[in-house]
Image (cartoon, grey):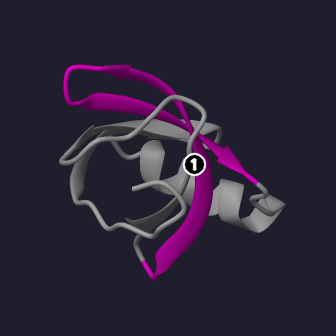
Amino acid sequence: MAGGVGTSHGISLDVSEGGMGALVQGRLSVGETVAIDLPLRERTLNAVAIVRHISDKRCGFEFVGLSAEERAQIMSVAGES
């Protein structure tokens, strides 16, 4: 959707402070900037990420602009798996 805003749903497969992998519905493009709502223990993190790779329906995202606190929150949840 060039120049527009779209919404898609996905299932996170792995999460780290630098990014995440997910199964995603819909079409994304490598290099595209997306907004991700990531449910954490105490709140939902609203993150911005860049699509770094796509294979079939799995996508890899790199988080951008996260604060040190947000990265620590992700790591506390990611360390539980």
Quarter of the figure with residue 39? bottom left
Give the residues in magenta: 42-64
For label 1, the SS is: helix
Relative height, residue 30 to residue 78 (above, below): above
Relative height, residue 16 to residue 40 (above, below): above
Task: Pinpoint residue 60: horizontal percent, then vertical percent.
Answer: 44, 30
Q: In the image, is 67 to the left or to the right of 55?
A: right
Q: Which residue is mark 1?
A: 75
Quarter of the figure with residue 3? bottom right
Residue 51 covered by magenta stretch: yes
Q: In the image, is 7 to the left or to the right of 32?
A: left
Which of the image's four quarters has the N terminus? bottom left
Instruction: Name the kind of residue labelled 1 in the image.
Output: Met
At x 55% / y 55%, what residue is drawn?
74
Q: Nearer the viewer, residue 59 or 21?
A: 59
Quarter of the figure with residue 69? bottom right
Task: Pinpoint residue 40: horizontal percent, then vertical percent.
Answer: 42, 69
Secondary structure predominantly adopted by residues drawn in magenta: strand
Q: Is residue 56 visible?
A: yes
Task: Pinpoint residue 4: horizontal percent, then vertical percent.
Answer: 47, 67
